[in-house]
Each structure stands twice: as structure tokens, then as C-alpha cells.
Amino acid sequence: MSDHDLFPYLYEWASDMDVSLAGNLRRWAENEVMAKRLELKEDYEQLLEPAMRKLFLEIGMQRLLWPEEHGGDGHNTPAASLTITAALEQVARGDVGIALLLSSLWALQSAVAMEGAVNGEACAALAEAVAGRDEPALVSLVLPLFRDEPQAAAKHGKGGWTVEAASTRPLACGGNASLYAVLCALQGSEEEWGVLLIPGDAKGIERGDALKRTGLAADINTPVSFGKVKVPEGMCVAEGREACRAMLSWLYLGISASTVGALFASYEILKEWGDSRVIKGRGHIFKENPLTAAVMAEVAKETSLARMLTWDLARILSEPAVYGPPGQEGNHVTAAMVVHQVSQAAENAINRAMEMMASAGYAREWNLERYWRDVKALQLCLGPYELAKMDVSRYFYRASTL
Amino acid sequence: MSDHDLFPYLYEWASDMDVSLAGNLRRWAENEVMAKRLELKEDYEQLLEPAMRKLFLEIGMQRLLWPEEHGGDGHNTPAASLTITAALEQVARGDVGIALLLSSLWALQSAVAMEGAVNGEACAALAEAVAGRDEPALVSLVLPLFRDEPQAAAKHGKGGWTVEAASTRPLACGGNASLYAVLCALQGSEEEWGVLLIPGDAKGIERGDALKRTGLAADINTPVSFGKVKVPEGMCVAEGREACRAMLSWLYLGISASTVGALFASYEILKEWGDSRVIKGRGHIFKENPLTAAVMAEVAKETSLARMLTWDLARILSEPAVYGPPGQEGNHVTAAMVVHQVSQAAENAINRAMEMMASAGYAREWNLERYWRDVKALQLCLGPYELAKMDVSRYFYRASTL
Amino acid sequence: MRTIDDFTRPLEYLSPLDDPLGMVVREWAETCVIPYRRRFDEDWKEHELIEPAFKRLMGELGMQRVLFPEDLGGWGLGRSNYAGTSSYRLFEEVARADSGMAVAFGVIYWPMVMICMEPHVNRELCEEFAPIFCSTTEPRFAANAMTEPQGGADIENMEIVKGSTIQTTAVLDGDEWVINGHKLWPTNSGGVCNLFGVVCTTNPGSEDPNDFAFIFVPADTPGVTQGPPYEKAGMAADKNGDIWFENVRVPKSYRAHGPGLDLLYFKEVITFGNMGSIAFVGGSMMNVYERLKDFVSEETYRGKPLKEHDAVAGVLADIARDIEIIRIVGYQYARMIDRPDLYGPRWSDEMVAKGRAYKYWACDRAVEDVGKAMNLMSTYGADRDWDVEKHWRDLKIVQLWMGGKQLCQAEVARWFFECETL
Amino acid sequence: MRTIDDFTRPLEYLSPLDDPLGMVVREWAETCVIPYRRRFDEDWKEHELIEPAFKRLMGELGMQRVLFPEDLGGWGLGRSNYAGTSSYRLFEEVARADSGMAVAFGVIYWPMVMICMEPHVNRELCEEFAPIFCSTTEPRFAANAMTEPQGGADIENMEIVKGSTIQTTAVLDGDEWVINGHKLWPTNSGGVCNLFGVVCTTNPGSEDPNDFAFIFVPADTPGVTQGPPYEKAGMAADKNGDIWFENVRVPKSYRAHGPGLDLLYFKEVITFGNMGSIAFVGGSMMNVYERLKDFVSEETYRGKPLKEHDAVAGVLADIARDIEIIRIVGYQYARMIDRPDLYGPRWSDEMVAKGRAYKYWACDRAVEDVGKAMNLMSTYGADRDWDVEKHWRDLKIVQLWMGGKQLCQAEVARWFFECETL
């Protein structure tokens, strides 16, 4: 039993395939990332990019949720929510930034490729990037930074859409995306919002200077401007608030599971520290001191509860027949509550873990500080919590103007 | 749909019976308690005692988990964990103190009456109290106040046990219990701990003055001393740490579900306030102000996540074949993590709800302050969180001296 | 042995009065309050146990007189440069015993702030009302009648509503104000009040600061009716109820200062309210410290006092730390009140906003800390025997009054971040 | 417009030096640091950008000299009654620009506390070391070599381990100390140090306070080796590394004070460390306020500046509130350092415990607040462009150093609750 099987969750939901996939990805994380980290640190070219290639292409994660008819592995059912949860826990344990890129891809795939609602035109257009090329399919989501204000606008006209936006801030991959998925305010449509797909090499895209960010080294991000970018009709893949929210619910699940993975890694680092560190100079092992044990307990507790909640969310998304579709207001609010809770709990837990390790907590050598930066950067992909609360209150108190 | 069906949980687990029972108990809470509360406040004789009789005897909750062969309804399977969760949510919504009394009873019943492990001698001895008399079966649990230090000791001798303890502080019902279930340090046994059952009228029991407490008005509590009380062999119903922990896991589930019920009630009070209150003198409805909405969102979020976690725990206890027995270290730690999390989240949420309502938050008339006091008193039944963390750390970090 | 006197105070700020007065009140607390306070909750309506303690403190020891000028029988604190720090200490000591008594006691001064404090002493009104408080050894109560049924703390949300929501009207009829309205919840109402300061409007719905009026109304004026006290989660010593003003007539001169100035100086009332609240929190918390220290020293775990368990000690440290900071910040604010020459007028937006900041911080910490203290005490934490649950119930009330946390946050954000539409 | 100068300071505590000096440093920060600091992270090893700013501040403006007596080229702060409050302000201003620089700067004083502060000035050593700092315009660095590989902050956990875990030995050989040991992590090591204060034992394993020795070692003494700097989450301007002392010989007189007194006054070093830490936190947080205020004023939501959204304003208020309180408490502690006549010696257990309490409180608040500030900024919060994430990384380091929170809690509980075995 590996250490993090310690952490409770309702594992009756995980299929044999989920469990076996998680085992494979655990080995990927250890061999391709963690074992090389002391030497290569956060090097993109030597460490992260090769690991990503292996994960996306060789292990084939980018084809997992993709329809068989478009060259994928055909796990494009709602039950994939459980599979990606099992997978992202392990991927993020190795590298949180890579887990974010995968989460973005899967969120998009949930919108275009779900069994029973496959968007044939979009899938055909994406098939090359997802299942054809020998390049990782990197999806750059351009979502509202402040809750319900899209960064881009799309105007409907003859033969399609025109997307216009200055200096947007993508969630990730602004600099090297195969594909942009841009949540736009729609003009000339009955729906308010839509997600438009734009190939990375489309005309009218301009990228700014690379952003220096606090974490997520696997993500090459830049501001991106869209100058009158033409998008064919069928590439508006999620039209309407509910469809956009469905994609967000899947994204939130991905971020939540990735955060749990970071917690696993943090727990392991802390456990190693607690096993070996001597304090008070009298042969006291660190973990046996009640004050530090109390803090270490918080880390374990937050990890456990974050995992349970994440799997609950995965289950809800996996059974739309029971719990309703993922874009339904209640489910979207549940996803938002879970992911914010998990993210804050993780921020708190890793903060506490660092406190335990004193200078080893902030020394790059021990890696803990990297998970701390990554988890925070991941959290910020969700936008301000204070604004997310407005969605929660709208739903629970039937407030209409928030 | 009633208001609190808003709150997400994995309801696929709730049986039809659970749902229908919850509906009945919802009506009990509204008719027998809430409707009369403005007039009768926390009056024991006129409000709480009659409501309790109705619940325990007429609706028959005290017979629910009881084996058919001993006069009960025979829902004495592990799946009862889901039933009692559904039930206690509703009972506590009406009155938290009554929910505690029921939780105590059910925790004991889980130890003596579970299908496949029915303790025939104990059940026979208890049958009269549970299924025979026309009195509520009130169980007074005497548990360690500080984690692993029992308040009582039991010495094994010819023909049984002798229990000795001065001035214990029971969880509840010290003053009027039908039955004391005393967790004792065992002497003359291979096991360290055991739960001994002592009838309320046993010789050697002495009760002190009634305790004035901050909440839980339905509970008549006093310190209790046990002066060389003789207990027959078979009345040691949970021998060993694991058996004791199993009972505690069930108790924690009960407390957790009761806390969720208090959160439902608090949400409803706050919602009514938010719907009707006008602020800033310009026709602004309270709930539409983003700052107050943000706090109200916290209340809804805490309620939702507390509910999800509580049902997760219920599921784990309901499926020992999948998740292992309830007294297994991992499950006991999960139960402890969940109940402490839920309890603290509830303390925080009700604190915040009170802040929203200003003086109405602390006026008895609005009842919110009562749930606040009750939930805190319920939390204290768990003992200090700092000490519970030692169990968490022991488990997750394999610490041996904590 | 460490005591509450080991918590830091900024010693340079203290007037010579500070310790002598503090000790008088502490002696009073030990003999007149602490032995009886566990029965106060049941005494909320009758005040049979509570009243004698008030009489001793306010009437016999004369604490109800301190703000009035010396020549009118007072102690002249209103014209001193230590009204802030001295009353901070007094409030702290009273609240250590019972914060319900502390607020009842503190609020006697509250309307008087409008007329007894330099540089805006209203000598005529001081002369008028001093006898009520200064020529008796019976306790006398004053109250600020502010809150109204429809808007709660809106009255205090001056920046936004600018008095426009006040429904209690004052109409000048010859040389008299005629007052009509319904107030509720003020401390020292519920039947005990002798003198009200009433927040009125001279022009309903107006946002003109000139229309805000603060008018004194003796409680025995015809047309004034006080309802019975409400039942609350705590603070039995503080009675709160409804007050109805029905064609109540008082002399024109009973308006504190007149158009514009009433509102201006009313902000100083808020400043004092925040300072007092911090002191109540600090005093209560010091007693929590005392009782908790008893508990964790007496109760044992694994053969040692509970306080020797490292994880328990971590929580104890947090609580001691917060009391330290509450006291330092509270005294600093009191000193800012005492030194307007350095920190600006007590009624400035800055002083009000900063007071709100400190007050809501102190309350938040206290509520959380006492919750944790109770938790350390296991089931005993819920028992009245240990007094901690009493402070927990009382402190929650301090947190919620005066508009609660959200109003504090709005004012703090408005001032520091220059928000304009909050 | 509100600025950081609107945060409260206890004005009566400030020396006349406070504002002039503060303004000099602020000017330096604006011209020498803030324009470049976004590239500091990549400069952690070379210090090509960082070094000139140090030179200006410490060498040219002369800030490295302030603690030394005037007649030795210093500014005499060590013998003044405003060393605490003046350095508090200096640290705050430097940390506003870069807390890594602030700690590097502050730690120059740190070993000097042992010999430059009244009433325990060691004139001989002042004369010996003053030239290093006072007769140059180049920046000079000092470091306290305390932490050792095996025990981390154990060295600072004086109450429990009483120096028994110190592995660095000092043996008297004639008129010289021979020092052997391995230290790591001190600020201003990693190659930059000119003068070490080394915590040694004269009797390994002993708990006798007399065996604790604080000995000065110039970095160029034969046998001293500094390793390269470590890579950290933040604070690129502060270099930390290993130091090996191999049969290092220094004169007997280089021991600060001798048996017993070394340990006694070393506690004053802890006091200064806590005061400095609070100032670093306060300074960083004031810049967070500035940058956050820019952000929430510029970015809009629903057609209004983000700060006008009430829920966002609630968080802004919390942050402003905490900065207020950090500053008040920090200055109060600095004043307690300046007035041992009122508050007792700076090396007392009380002063140490209280400093720990304020320090860990300030750090906890700051870490939480900056986390929330970043969250308000959405994805931008992670960008170096907005500077807030920089302070977030730096502040975490302040929270963790000097033994971290748990050691603080243990000392606070020990003092206030009289624990004996923690």
C-alpha cells in the first residue's frame, strides 16, 4: 500500500481501470519528474517538456477522453470524471503545472466529446491536434478573470464568428497553445456566452512577453490578443451559460484533483521530515512532539477531507442521470464550493507543513515550497473567491442582483 | 422541494425508507418543537420532554436499530448508518439536545445489536428499556473527557465487574438516564478498555447537582459517581480499544449529522432574515448586498460540505465489507476528522450567521443563538480537538508515543 | 505567579489615576460581582442580584459622575487629557467581572460624551443633568436611543445613509422639541433608563447633516414609554428594550449642539463606543485567561497538568498573545482619544474608521479564542461553573452590536482604500 | 490620497530622527530598489543588481554604522534611547522595497547588539570592529552563526535545551579561542559576510549557562570557509549558506562578555530579531497595500473599480486593519526596547516571550492576508508584475525563521501559563 492510499475516499467508485491507470501515473511521476528534480529543478526543456510528452503522447492521456471515431481511446463518458480524478491526483503529485495543462484539455474535451453529445465538427477539427500529431495537445483556456465578465467578445456574422479581445490573460499556455478555448460574450446570438475554439496559429493572434509567475513552471504563459480572429460557426462549442458552466465544472474537478495530488506530495515530504528530524536535542523525533504532531495532523486531515470532497464531486459529474447535468446551477455551485474549499484547505495545509520544516520549508532543495507556489497559482486560476461566493449566494438565497 | 434539499450530498445512498423517515421527522420537528418554540422557549416539561416521548416512543426511534427478536424494528444492519444520518439531520433541525440523546442511544445500539454481532445477553437485559417500557430510553455515555483517559475503572472478579469512579462527567443524561454506558479502564482483563452497561437504578450510583450548561436544554445532566457498582460479565459490551472505537465512530456520525441539522435550521433563519431585511435605507434587500451575501455564502458552503462529508462517513460505516469495520483505526480516524471538521465548520458558520443578524442574532426570540449554543455544547462532547489530533497523527505518521 | 497585570500596557500613556481607580474597581468586582455572577442569567428580568452591585459601583463609589465637571459634582474627566485611557481601564476591570455590567456602566457616559467632553462642553446641559447622576448614591442610567425597527444599525452607517433613514422626528414647537418615534435595543433601556440621548431627524428622509438632531430626553418626561427587557444569549446585566416617544416635549435647549454639530460630535460617540467595546473584550478575555489557567493547571492528562501538553500549550499561547495585542491596541486607541493634538479630532472619519478596525479585530479574535478555550476544557467548557462559557456568550454580543463586523469593514475599506460607493 | 503614512504610529514614541531617516530610506527605495526588484529573483547568486543598492544604503548613506559609538565613526544609536523605534522605522522602509534587503541590512546590527548596546557596551570590541563598518563606503556584512545541521532552531530554544545541543566548540588555548564547527543558514552568509558572531559551547553537552559562548570571528580568519548561497523561495537579496570553522583562532577578547553574560545578552539578540521581523512584516505589508490599492482601483468589475464591490472591500478592510495593528504593536515593542527603565531589561524572559508573541502573530496575519490579496487579483495575483507574489514568498520566510511559530508558541505559553516541561 502506498502512502496516500491512507487517505480515505469512497473508493468503491473507482473502476479497476482507474486504479491501474493511477498506478501507472504514479510511476510516471516518480520516474519522469520526482527522481530527476534535485538535479534539474524546474527546468522546462530538460525536465518538464519531456515528462509532458511522455504523459500526453506516450501514455496517451490526451486521447483518453477522446471518441474512438476521432482517433481517441473512447473513455468519453461521464464516468471519465472518476478516471481523471484518479489520474490527476497522481500527475499533480509529480508536477502541478502539467496537471493544470491536462485539466484544461480535459475540460475542453468534456465540452466537445462527451458520449451522446459529441460535437462532430469540432472533434473533426481537433482530431489532428489531439490524436494525430506528435505534439502535446496544449489547450489555453481564456476564461473570465472576474467571475462573469468574459475577457473576449465574439460577434456573429455571415459564416461564423469574429473574436476580438485585447491583452487577455489565459489560464495557461498563452505562449504555446495548440488551441485557444475562449469564453466570449456573444453578440448577435440569443445566448449570452459561448466558448470559441481558435487554433494556435490562427490569424490575428498576438502573444505578449512571457509572464513571470510564482509557480507552474510547466506552463508557458503570455498575454494574448485576438484581433478580429475569424472562427467558423461550429467552433462555438459551448453556447449559453449552462454549457459554459458545464465545462467549468469539469475544470474545477480537474483543479481540485490536482490540488489533492499536491497535498499527497506535501504530506510525503513532511512525513519524511517528521520521521528523521530530531528536536530538543534529546533524541526526540520530530513527529512525536505533540505540538508539531498537532500541525501535522492538520495537514493529514485537510488532505483526507479534500480528497473525499473531490471524489464526491467526481461522482456527481459521473452520474448526470442521478444528479443532473454538470452545467446545472446546483452542480456548478457544488463544483465551485468544493474546488474553493479544497484549494484553500491545501493552501492552509501546505503553509502549515512549511512551518514545520522551518528553513527546509523554503529551501528549493526540499521541493515543498514548489508545491506551495504551484497550489497557490492553481487557486488563482479560479478567480477571486469573494466573487465566486456571489454565485453561491445567488443559488442558495435566490438573490437576483448579485 | 424543501429548502435543505438544496444542499448537495450523495443521495443515491439514501433508501426510500430513509427519505420517507426524514420526511416524517421533518414534520415532527416542525409540529412538535419549532411551532411551539416562541411560546415555550426551552421549557423541558412542556416542550422538550413531550417532543422526546413522541419521537422515541410513538414514532419509535428507540426501536429502529433494535433486533426484531428483542422487540425492535430490526433495522440493525450497518446500513442503519445512512438511516440515522437522514433522521438526525431532521431531529436536530428541531432540537439539537434531543438529537444528542438519540445519537447516544444509537451509538450504544451499534455496539450491542448489530446484525451478525448481536450481544444476546445485553440485548435481553436492555429489551425492557428499549422496547418494553413506555419511557424514552435515555443512555448516558460516560466517555473519556481527555482523549484516552477513561473516567472510570472496572475491576474484573468473580461473576463480573466492579465499576468505580468519582464524579464523572457524562456526555448527557447524568441525571435521568435509563442506562449508563461507561467506558472503563479494565483491570484484570487482557483488554485495556471496555464499555460497561449499568442500569440507571443500580446500587452505588450517586448523582450530583444538576449542571447549568450553555445549551442542550433537553439534556438533564449531573455529575455521576459510581461506588463499587457490580456489573454482570455480559454487560461489558465493547471489550478492547477497537470495539470501543467502533461505538465512538457511530457516535461521531450521530453528532456530525446532528450538527448538519443545526446548520439547516440556521440557514433557514438566516434566509428568512435575508429575504425580509432592508438595509442602507434605500430599499436594498439584505441578501442582495455583496458583502453580506459573501458571508451568507459561507454559511451555505459550510452546510453543504458538512453534509457531504457526513454522508461519506455514513457510507463508510454502512459498508464494512468494502471499507472495513467501524472500529478499525483508519475508519475511526476518518470519523474523528469528519466530525471535528463538521463541528468547527458549523461553529464558524453559525457565528457568521449571527453576525449577519446583529441583535436578532443574540435575541432569544430568533432562536439562532440557541443553535449556536447547542452546536458548541455538542462539539464539546467530542473532547478537545488538540488531543484528537494526536490520534490523527499517530495514524498518518506512525507516531508511537503520542 | 503571573496574573492579568502581566499583560502589557503602554505605561507612558497612563494617568496617575489609572492604577488606583483600577484597583478600586477590582476590589468591587471580587466582592460584589464575581461571587454572584453565575446566577445573573436567571436574574435578567428582575436584577435583584445585579442591582446592588450597580449601586455600589456607580452610586456609592461614584463612578457615574466621572465625566461631569468638578464644580457640578463630577470628577472632571471630560476636560482632562486622560478620559480615554482612564475609562479604558475602568471598563476593562468591570468587564473582567461581567461585561454586561461593563456596558451598562459605560453607556452612562455615552450620551454625556456629546456635552461633557472638551472642546464641545455644553455647560448649560451639564448643569441641567449633573444632578441626576451627581447628587445621589443610587445608580442612574443613561442610554443612547439610536436603533430603530426598520433599519438596525443603519443609523450608524452615516457615510451612506446620512441620517436619511431616521424615522424618529423632532419638530420645534415654540421653545420645545416635540419628539415622536420608536427606538429599540439601546443598552440601559428595558425600564432602567433615567436619561435618553435620542437620535432624531428634523426633516424625515433628508440627507442634510443639519437635519440630524441629538436631543436629551429625561426618561420621566410624559409620553416616554419603556418596554420590558428582551431575553438574550447573555449579558443579563444589560437591559435592552423598546422605547416609544409619543408627543414628547423637551426644552429647545436639550438639543446637544444644533444643526451640523450634532452629527459631527455624534461620530465621537461612535469613537467612544469602539474604544469601550475593545476594553470590554480585553477585560472579559483577561478573566478567560484566569479561569482557563486555573483549569489547565488543575486538570491533568497523562499525569501532568493539561497545560504541559505541548499541543494544548499552543492554543494557550495563541490566547495569551491575542490578549496582549488587544490590550496594546486598545490603550493606543484610548490614547489617541486623549491626544487630539497629535491624532486629530475624535470625531474625524479617520478616528472612527480606525476604531472600527480595532474593535472588529478584537471581537473576532475573542470569539474565536474563547471558542477554543472552551474546546480545551472538553465537556466542562459548556458548564457555567467555569465562567468561560459566560464570557463566550457575552463576547458574541459585543461583536454584534454597533452595526457588527460588516459595517466596520465598510468603513475601514472606505477610509483606507478611498472607496466611494460602498 | 491615502498613503502608507496614514497607518497609525504611536507618535509620542518617535525620536526626532524617525521621519528624516525614514524619508532618506524611502527615497533610496524608490530609486535604487523598486525599479529593479522584479529581476532580483534571477540575481540571487550573483547580486549584480542587488549589490549597488546595498552599497548606497549601507556604505554611502552609512546605515551600517549607526549602532557604533560616535567617536568610533558610528551614530551612537546603541547608547541612545531610541535604538528600537529608529531601527523599526528603518527596517520597515527597507522591507517595503525588499524584505530580503531588509534582513540583510538588519542583521548587520544583530551581532553588534551584543557589544554596542547600553548597558553592556564592550568598548574594546567596538574599537576592534568599528573600522570594518565605519571607515568605508563599501557595504559590509555581519552574521550571527547560530543554527547547526543537527538541530535547526534548537539553538534558540534556550529554555529547554540550555545550549546543550551546540556542537560548535570553542577551546581556550593560551590567549586564543580555537573554534571548530559547522553552521548553516545565517543571513549574510553564502560568501558575503565580513564578521561573524558565532554561538559556541566551551563544554559540549553542558546545560550550564556559563559554557555558552558568543565569539566574534572576522570572516577572513584562516580556517573559516563560506559555502555558496542556497536557492530559496524568495528573499534573493539575503544570502544563506554553510560556514565551516576549522581550527579557527581568534583572540581571547573576542568573546562578547564571558561566562553567563553571553547567554544573558544573547536573549537580547532574540528580542531584536523579533522586533526586526515585525518591522519587515509591516514594511512588506505596506507595499502590498500600495500595490493592491493600485490594482483594485484600476481593475474594474461591473463598470466600477473592483474596490467598490462590497465583498472585495471586506477583504481590503481586513488587510488594512491588520497592517494598522502590526504597526501599533511593532512600535510598542520597539518602545519597550527603548525604555528598559519602564519595561525591564531587553534580555528578560518576559521581553523575549512577548516579542515572540507579536512576531508570530504578525507573520500569521501577513501570510494569510497576502494570500487573500493575491486571490482578489485573480490570475494576475501570481504575476511578478504586481509585486504582491514577491512579498508573499518573502513573508513566508520571515514566518519560518528564528524557530518558526511553534517555538514562539512554546515560549509564550511557558511565560503566561507558567508551564514547566514544554
Image (cartoon, coloured by chain):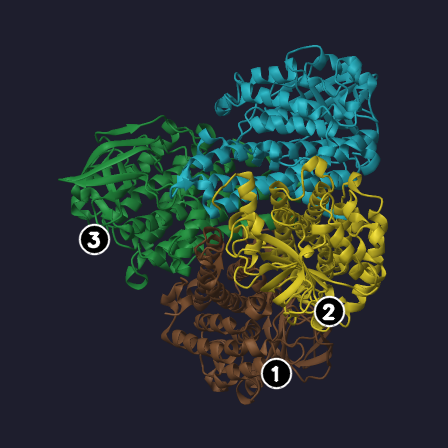
Chain colours: A green, B brown, C yellow, D cyan
Q: Is residue A356 visible?
A: no
Left or right, residue C210 beside residue C79: left
Both labels 1 and 3 in a single chain: no
Q: Nearer the viewer, residue B395 or A328?
A: A328
Rendered location of residue C146, percent (x, y): 61, 58
Is residue B338 depicted above or below D237 in this figure? below
Number of labels in the image equals 3
Q: Nearer the viewer, residue C257 or D329?
A: C257
Query: Which chain's residue wears label 1?
Result: B
Left or right, residue C121 beside residue C228: right
Residue sitting at 36 percent across and 52 percent down?
Answer: A19
Disc 1: CA contacts within 10 A as few (<14), some (14-19) or many (>=20): few
Q: Which residue is mark 2?
A: C40
Q: Quadrant of residue A90?
A: top left
Q: Amino acid at mark 2?
A: Phe
Question: Which label belongs to residue A117?
Answer: 3
Q: Which residue is mark 1?
A: B45
Rendered location of residue A85, percent (x, y): 37, 50
Q: Secondary structure at mark 3?
A: loop
Is residue C201 depicted above or below C420 in this figure? below
Q: Secondary structure at mark 2?
A: loop
Both labels 2 and 1 in a single chain: no
Q: Nearer the viewer, residue D220 or A101?
A: A101
Q: Gap between marks 2 and 1, in whole Å?
A: 23 Å
Label 2 close to label 1 by CB (< 8 Å): no
Query: Which chain's residue wears label 2?
Result: C
Front disc: 3 or 2? 2
